[in-house]
Image (cartoon, rainbow, N blue to C red):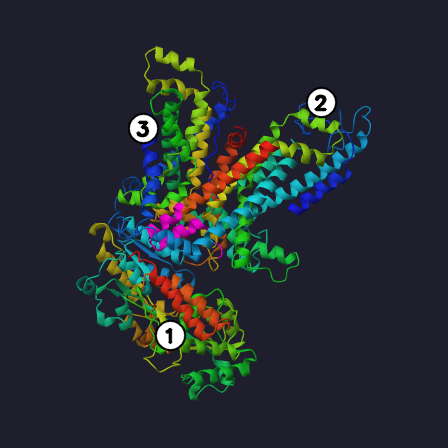
Amino acid sequence: MRDRPPPPGTPPGPPPAAPRTAPTRRALLRAAGALGATAATGGLLTGCGTAIGQGFTGGAGPASKLDFWNPFTGGDGARMVEMERAYRERHPGIDLNATTFVWGDPYYTKLTLATLGDRPPQVAITHLSKIPTLAGAGLLREIGDDELAAQGMTADRFDERAWQKAHHDGALRAIPLDTHPFVLYVRTDIAKKAGLLGPGGALPDVDGPEEFLDALRAAKEVTGAWGCSIASTKDPSTCFRLFWSLYRQLGGQLVADEGQRVVIDMAAAEEAFAYVQRLTREKLVPTGVDSPGAITLLTSGRAGFLLDGVWQILAVQDAKVPFDMRPFPRIFREAAYACHADSHGLVLPKSPSEKAQRADTALEFVRSLLDASDAWAGGGHVPAWLPTQRSAAYRKLEPQSHYAAAADGAAYDPSAWYSGAGSSLHNRLGDVCASVLGGRTAPGRGAARMREELRELAATPSPL
Amino acid sequence: MAASTSASADTGTGTGTGATTGPVGRPGVRGLGGGRGPKGLRGGGPWRRSREPEGAPLSGAMRAVGAERLFNRVALGVLIALAVLWLVPLAWAFATSVRSSDEIATDPTAWWSGSPTFAAYGDLLTGGKLPYWYANSFITSALTTVLTVLTASLAAFALSRLRFRYRRPAFLLLLAGLMVPPQVLMIPQFLALQETGLLNTYWAVVLPQVPNVVAVFVFKQFFDGIPEELTEAARADGAGWLRTYWQIVMPLSKPAISAVTIFVFVWAWNNFLWPLLVVTDPEMMTLPVGLTSVQDAFGIPQAQLMASAVLGGVPLLTVFLLFQRRIVEGIAGTGLK
Amino acid sequence: MLAPFGFFYLVFLIGPLLYLLVAGFFNTSLVKGGLGEWVGLENYRRAMSTEEFWTSLWHSMWFTVLTTVPLVLLALVLALLTDRFSQGRWFFRLAFFAPFVLPSSVISLMFMWIFADQIGLAQSWAKSLGSETPPSWLGDPDWAMLSIAAATVWWTIGFNFVIYLAALQEIPRDVHEAAALDGAGPWQRIRHVVVPMLGRATTLVTVLQLVASLKVFDQIYMMTGGGPDRATEPALLYVYNTGFTEGRVGYASTVSLVLFVVILLISLVWFALLRRTEKEG
């Protein structure tokens, strides 16, 4: 829109007829030029200088500088800033330059373009579900056991699932920071009135298809509105997380060979969808609620449960209502326990030279973030750093420690270039799930639609 | 908005049955046609009450004057209302930027602050990367401008004065370039810069913006207006083409140079998509890209966002105020060529 | 003397255009380097059968309609009205034109705040006008494009306004006088005398506007990122997403080329149509 060509601005006519105002304008131009020059020199003196020099030459920054990119704002952002401050205090010689970007696709695009442009940050946060895409594109430096061990980081000190997910092609590409599963929020006061609480005030298992529905029915009796709320509008990811958790408990897989082959288990998908649809058909779960709306239903007492990611803990805590959190219930027993989860990990994007890579400094910084995992856990994330996850302090942290076990059942997104956090797989399959949840698509038809979408995605030639 | 204007127009039709109006001889009221003084007809000042018709009006003129006056009043009302509406976003951005976050939280849409504070501006200018972005924007825009003016004027000079064999094909090829929106070329341009390892340098931002066909045409149009005799005389004195260009033609072309300079500078400063692609290092970003790419980790402080919008707008608003006439004339020239 | 310009022109305009033509036949990848494998017309076939390609093209056109109509008509009306006054003209010019010089990111920041849910000015005004639950201007798929178009009209109307204003000043005064003598009122004069004489300016303004609007990217990228539910994703953002986010450079080249041809055809057809009516008129 903005992109008009600069309009031809010449007043036609013989050249000597310059407008009368010319001298003033020239003077102004000159003044503006002088101003600009002053600004530039001022910058040179105050340290913009290196950046400006680099702007012309494209060289690597000074060795004492460590660039760190993350997409955290709000509560997570504030915690991350605290963790960075702790690092700075202990490493005054390092100029830690942390930048927060807008979350979502733009963040990954920027990370990709930065690495292709030979100026990536030394350390960056990614979702581990993005590792197949990023590592497959050759953007991530492999992290060797030795350099890791030099900072005291060894495989046995990390959550096993997250650790596995951080690998690509047999090599470690990321250092896991946390796991953030899809969990069940419970209004304890409502659950108590519904007679759901066992001795000691804890919610007993609500596992099994009928058991979970019974619990929702009981909660609905108390709230008079809904049993459980789930965001299904403008939130395809949440819908996909619900489906994926159930479907993985039935043992289903969606794609194989890094996304090139569709291996959807139609019977399992239909069964998972049938269960999803029961939730709304029996009026236990509302349709047409967006993410903030779903949280409000819980906090305002119109729903006794909420299925959502652990990161919503801050929003629920803000409402100052009694609540607890548990792992996503085990509805089906056809396969090992599973619930949708993703992890944040720290990656070292490939730099053009070892000098620019600064791997040792980067890993030292990573270690310092891991050591601050207890602060990070406040935001709901289950620490991947076992010294923290198994510490007495974390076990006492409530309600965080109540769902830490969910990390053991973490079911990450399918591994494919079009998959991962905020991906087109989330959006497309999530739309199908939302349609089934809303009763607009029958379970069998939903499974078929899902297969169509996957076939289309799988047929798209991979750019990797 | 459209509804109200057409309503006023209807009013005009309804009453505008009379016969005559003339241009108005008063400075301050530009009647239809320029306000350069009465000529032929006399008539009432269309919207100035004080200016009642002088002397005997032509037949039916009284009614016409009434209609004219009413029409003008409605027109003025509509214009002022719209102009104020047009200033609202800017004013509100500024009003928000000087309020404290507490005030914004309690009453987000209030216009006045009980205790105005420029803290948000201070934070941005000292804590953030804004000073880098200013410097980067200035450097890249200035470089783009200088290179564009030089290459475009040289090319225009060649097309205007030199008689070479492929002049016409070259001209046509250039003309065709007007049809290509540079945005659709972003992929190959990016790849080219990646190949040469120039990404994340100023050159990546500057170089692809240099071939500006419009600038060539502006210069050529201007050079064509410079009398042949002037350049021929220089040639006869033994000056080469380059010297003729530099010592004769360019000094005569200051209006064209200043017009191209202003437009290319503004255009380069405002470019968004291209620097977004080729500059990813937060300290190398230009102002428009940095403003919306980099976030504050502490959430969304509205005062700071609006302060950054104000700070982002100030340089160009200043340029606009300084060169208002030049810019407006330049654009108007597009319509009249 | 042509060489310096010619160099940049060939490297950054002609070369890239040829590259688009070629890469469209390959499955070129952003991250693998090189052209990749020859895939023939596969990219074209895929684009034609992909819904997102068509919807993004449609969004660009819808945005063009939503912006071009008010940007031309409203600019014309504003110029016609402003042309009647010489005092205070600088104020109107300042008010209507000043936003045009601002960068798109400043516009986006301001309007994201104005259109914000619950706390934005637009919702608060809608409430005071009697709407109990004003829409989420940028979050509702039905409203997002309209909201962005409104912001765009605010932003860029000054350009057309100034062109019209200049064209109006070119109309000889005698024309008005003759019409006035014939008994035409102000509205009739505007409709039957002035507007028909603005044909050239209108042609120019609409063609420039069409081309500019079809290339929309900045404010949509920043204000909605193409959402909600891809409801505002324009063609150029689709190119950006497939080319740079997904890394499918070959495919994105094909889409770029198609977009280029569409822009070219629309502006040429429109230009020809206007020229013809102008001649007939």
The local secondary structure at tag 3 comes to helix
Q: Amino acid at mark 2?
A: Pro
Q: Amino acid at mark 3?
A: Ala
Where residue B226 appears, as percent x and y from the top left, is 45, 18
Q: Are labels 3 and 1 assigned to the same chain?
A: no
Chain for disc number 2 = B
- Residue B286 sits inside the magenta stretch: no
Q: Nearer the viewer, mark 3 or mark 1?
A: 1
Q: Residue at x 67, y 42 (%)?
A: B78
One can see residue B207 in this view:
no
Mark 3, Cα crowd under 10 Å, few <14 / some 14-19 / many 20+, is: few
Q: Residue at x 77, y 32 (%)?
A: B65
Q: Are labels 2 and 1 assigned to the same chain?
A: no
The magenta stretch is C231-257
Q: Nearer the viewer, mark 3 or mark 2?
A: 3
Relative to B141, residue B234 above or below: above
Observer-nearest residue: A404 or A80? A404
Question: Residue C3 shows which numbered tag?
Answer: 3
Question: Residue B38 shows which numbered tag?
Answer: 2
